[in-house]
């Protein structure tokens, strides 16, 4: 139950994205809202008033108005949506005291300003209102609606709850339980995806752009952005804003954005930090769609800058605008129908990569490297301080963007790791996500949140990426290497690699590098060897690596690649071409592309000293061939292919299932509640259960217990990370792995495989089922802050392999240390809301 002594539940305040991509601020109603509610009523059409009150009501009586704005926030609650200072929608519930024994039913009503109907405000308010009602002990909503109010009837039906309808006296009564079901969550997540995608689309596909702070000097940042917008051929009007110049770059300039006579979809802000708040206010009055703030001096400048940044984001969102930045280096959209280069750098080549770079200063370097490597992008965002628009928003956008096939992310912080995990896991099944997240940056970001434990911080990041299929790299160079393979080549069906080249040295290096990257040097079949010898001559070495001889000509490359790829024991090829060869480089590239064209296996080239994509010459009939990813050295090629192969394996495998387990939740709650009763202090630090209490908690979740712990070789663990949520860990002989919950059957198998525990050993001591039950405990008992389990045999000391027990096939139990911490429920954090 919610605390009725709480005068105003600030936890229900949130900025939310609407169906059309705009933003509003949602909060509980206040008595001071009386004039705003009266003003809202005065703007309503007669039809909207009639649908809400079942009668004409030109003005609200004072008594009714007072009742509307004075609520107790428990039995009676109203949430309002504000745009600027105006209330544009209201949702309320009132507990029904009669007709139910428990008082768990409430009547609900909704009201949306006519000018804002159809934006999805009713749906998002219903989600938030239902969450608040559940917290207050209400489990069922009822609403009386006129039959003609189809919009409201659709709202209740499409919310994902199991609604029931009855008709009497000309009124439709809708009733539905508001329990948090999988169907309701799925509906909310789909709405979240659609709304976030539209909000990002406003920023990446504007119809008009204003550059605020565009100066006449070419060294001015705003002038550089203006020049690139013009050079890139932006498909819309561009408006320079300059307080003192009548024109910039031969284009009429305006003193303020409000002076522009036409609508402005996107404002690029390039003014000093102290001037930004006033610019945001002006953009709000102009009804600008979104902001890209390049100005530095906010969170990047210390605590005062962080406070100013939070305020400007609140001001922007409260007036319907999303923000990229501050400290951004701009955005790019290469779609010819948009042609947006709102950055200080020339537009990179068009392609099918979506790219987000968080570091502001890194944005220009990323664009330059993309251009050097001929890596084409669909859209690129330099997120800067990432005060508002985050990687999660962009994942939602790229999820539905047909122009994007590969996603690259340089991320220093996660906006909401749990949302990232949910979105990335779904998206990675169709579009690869490559992310550079170094251990140092992960530790630096999460140290405070993870009990100053850098190892746990990096472990949490690694567990998140493994669960979601994200391809993790440690450097930007590795990210570009992997991206050029994914952007130009099909995924490999396995790890078996053929190596073809003109010199033994690079071939041997490539073979060593493949093994270091977890790949296999393929064993070519005798039939393939015979075919290679027949085509290449006796001078060629036809074992893998295949040596074409130093003076090999283009036809030899084409034949060598084609025949090697045709071998059923080969999944991919790396081709090494050294400079002493007499063949021209482009001719060799064309030959390699020709050899790869007949199949669907990836081919990488090592052209010593060259990195990036090389385009083969079109065939005589004009048909294009796949671009060839090139690497300066074999080690980089093998490392990139190894990461791609592991991703392909993750994508091929089924998602696994979260098994149904028989547990005694009430027994577990008794243990936890007993401990909490003995620790009434609000101290958030964890405390350890007694051995008997730990045994009782384990037994409630079906984990067998034993009187004595085994040796230190094998440890199962559970830890609640404040940002990433619960992690299940497994360590053997110093090798440790972790997975985020919920844990599937395949996740448990992966943990065992990663630490090198064989199937027989695992089965004997029942590791996989215990990992799954430990994961369920982590999900359902959030008070468990930490747990450590060691296998032990109930009847004897340590046995074979350093594990437990004699005899070796005897019953195995677990001895545990368990720490609890008070856990505050935060149902509002699971709602659609901007951080």
Image (cartoon, rainbow, N blue to C red):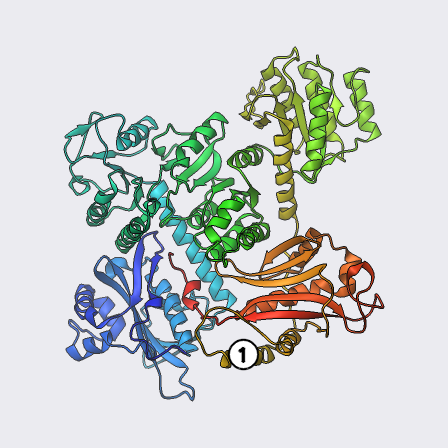
Q: Nearer the viewer, residue 610 or 20?
A: 610
Image quarter in which the C terminus is found = bottom left
Residue at x-position 44% and y-position 41% = 356
**Is 62 placed above or below 367 here?**
below
Secondary element at tag 1: helix
Image quarter in which the N terminus is found = bottom left
Regarding residue 409, the answer to whether it shows in the image is: yes
Asked if residue 113 lies left or right of residue 430, the reply is: left
Q: Quadrant of residue 120?
A: bottom left
Q: Nearer the viewer, residue 402 or 280?
A: 280
Percent position of residue 163, x then y = 44, 73
Percent position of residue 232, x then y = 35, 28
Percent position of residue 335, x then y = 40, 34
Residue at x-position 26% and y-position 34% = 237
Residue topped by disc 1: 675
Residue at x-position 27% and y-position 27% = 219
Asked if residue 52 lies left or right of residue 596, the reply is: left
Percent position of residue 653, x then y = 66, 50
**Is 610 placed above or below 410 here?**
above
Q: Nearer the viewer, residue 360 or 71?
A: 360
Regarding residue 349, the answer to whether it shows in the image is: no
Task: Estimate how packed mark 1 is, as few (under 14), some (14 to 19) or many (20 or more) residues with alpha carbons within 10 Å.
Answer: some
């Amino acid at each position: 139950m919610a605390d009725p002594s709480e005068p105003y539940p600030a936890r229900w305040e949130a900025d939310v994205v609407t169906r059309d991509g705009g933003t509003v601020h949602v909060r509980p109603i206040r008595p001071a809202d009386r004039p705003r509610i009266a003003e809202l009523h005065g703007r309503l059409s007669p039809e909207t008033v009639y649908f809400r009150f079942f009668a004409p009501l030109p003005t609200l009586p004072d008594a009714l108005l007072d009742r509307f704005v004075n609520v107790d926030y428990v039995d009676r609650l109203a949430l309002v949506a504000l745009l600027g200072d105006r209330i544009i929608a209201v949702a309320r519930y009132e507990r029904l005291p009669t007709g139910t024994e428990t008082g768990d039913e409430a009547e609900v009503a909704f009201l949306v300003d006519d000018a804002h109907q159809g934006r999805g405000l009713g749906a998002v308010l219903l989600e938030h209102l239902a969450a608040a009602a559940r917290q207050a002990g209400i489990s069922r909503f009822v609403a009386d609606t006129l039959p003609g109010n189809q919009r409201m009837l659709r709202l209740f039906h499409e919310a994902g709850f199991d609604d029931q309808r009855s008709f009497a006296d000309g009124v439709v009564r809708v009733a539905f339980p508001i329990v948090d079901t999988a169907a309701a969550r799925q509906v909310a997540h789909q709405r979240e995806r659609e709304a976030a995608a539209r909000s990002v689309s406003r920023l990446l596909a504007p119809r008009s752009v204003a550059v605020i702070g565009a100066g006449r000097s070419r060294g001015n940042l705003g002038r550089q952005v203006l020049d690139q917008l013009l050079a890139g051929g932006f498909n819309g009007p561009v408006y320079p804003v300059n307080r003192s110049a009548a024109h910039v770059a031969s284009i009429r300039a305006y003193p303020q954005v409000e002076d522009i006579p036409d609508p402005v979809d996107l404002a690029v802000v390039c003014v000093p930090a102290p001037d930004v708040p006033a610019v945001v206010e002006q953009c709000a009055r102009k009804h600008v769609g979104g902001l890209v703030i390049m100005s530095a001096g906010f969170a990047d400048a210390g605590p005062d800058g962080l406070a100013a940044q939070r305020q400007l984001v609140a001001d922007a969102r409260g007036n319907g605008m999303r923000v990229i930045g501050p400290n951004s280096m701009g955005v790019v959209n290469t779609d010819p129908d948009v042609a947006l280069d709102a950055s200080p750098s020339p537009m990179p080549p068009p392609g099918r990569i979506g790219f987000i770079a968080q570091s502001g200063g890194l944005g220009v370097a990323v664009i330059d490297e993309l251009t050097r490597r001929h890596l084409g992008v669909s859209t690129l965002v330099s997120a800067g301080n990432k005060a508002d628009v985050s990687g999660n928003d962009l994942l939602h956008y790229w999820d539905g963007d047909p122009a994007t096939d590969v996603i690259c992310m340089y991320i220093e912080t996660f906006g909401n790791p749990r949302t990232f995990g949910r979105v990335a896991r779904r998206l990675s099944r169709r579009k690869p996500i490559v992310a550079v997240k170094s251990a140092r940056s992960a530790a630096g970001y999460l140290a405070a949140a993870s009990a100053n434990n850098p190892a746990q911080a990096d472990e949490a990041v690694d567990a998140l990426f493994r669960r979601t299929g994200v391809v993790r790299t440690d450097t930007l160079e590795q990210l570009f290497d992997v991206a050029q393979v994914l952007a130009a080549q099909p995924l490999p069906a396995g790890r078996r690699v053929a190596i073809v080249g003109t010199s033994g040295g690079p071939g041997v290096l490539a073979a060593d590098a493949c093994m270091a990257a977890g790949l296999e040097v393929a064993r070519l079949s005798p039939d393939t060897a015979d075919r290679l010898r027949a085509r290449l001559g006796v001078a060629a070495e036809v074992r893998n690596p295949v040596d074409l001889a130093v003076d090999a000509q283009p036809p030899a490359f084409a034949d060598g690649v084609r025949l090697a790829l045709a071998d059923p024991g080969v999944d991919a090829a790396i081709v090494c071409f050294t400079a002493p060869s007499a063949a021209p480089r482009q001719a060799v590239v064309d030959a390699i592309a020709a050899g790869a064209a007949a199949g669907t296996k990836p081919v990488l080239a090592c052209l010593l000293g060259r990195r990036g994509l090389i385009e083969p010459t079109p065939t005589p009939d004009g048909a294009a061939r796949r671009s060839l990813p090139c690497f300066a050295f074999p080690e980089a090629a093998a490392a990139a292919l190894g990461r791609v192969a592991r991703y392909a394996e993750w994508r091929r495998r089924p998602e696994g299932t979260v098994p149904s387990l028989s547990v005694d939740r009430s027994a577990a709650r008794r243990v936890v509640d007993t401990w909490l009763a003995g620790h009434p202090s609000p101290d958030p630090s964890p405390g350890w259960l007694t051995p008997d209490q730990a045994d009782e908690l384990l037994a409630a979740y079906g984990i067998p217990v034993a009187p004595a712990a085994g040796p230190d070789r094998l440890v199962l663990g559970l830890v609640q990370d404040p940002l990433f949520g619960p992690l299940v860990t497994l360590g053997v002989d110093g090798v440790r792995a972790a997975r985020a919950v919920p844990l599937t059957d395949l996740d448990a198998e992966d943990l065992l495989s990663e630490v090198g525990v064989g199937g027989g050993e695992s089965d004997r001591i029942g590791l996989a089922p215990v990992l799954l039950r430990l994961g369920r405990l982590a999900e359902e008992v959030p008070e468990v802050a930490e747990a450590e389990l060691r296998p032990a045999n109930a009847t004897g000391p340590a046995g074979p392999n350093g594990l437990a027990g004699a005899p070796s096939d005897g019953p195995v139990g677990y001895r545990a240390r368990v720490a609890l911490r008070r856990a505050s429920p935060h149902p509002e954090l699971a709602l659609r809301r901007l951080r």
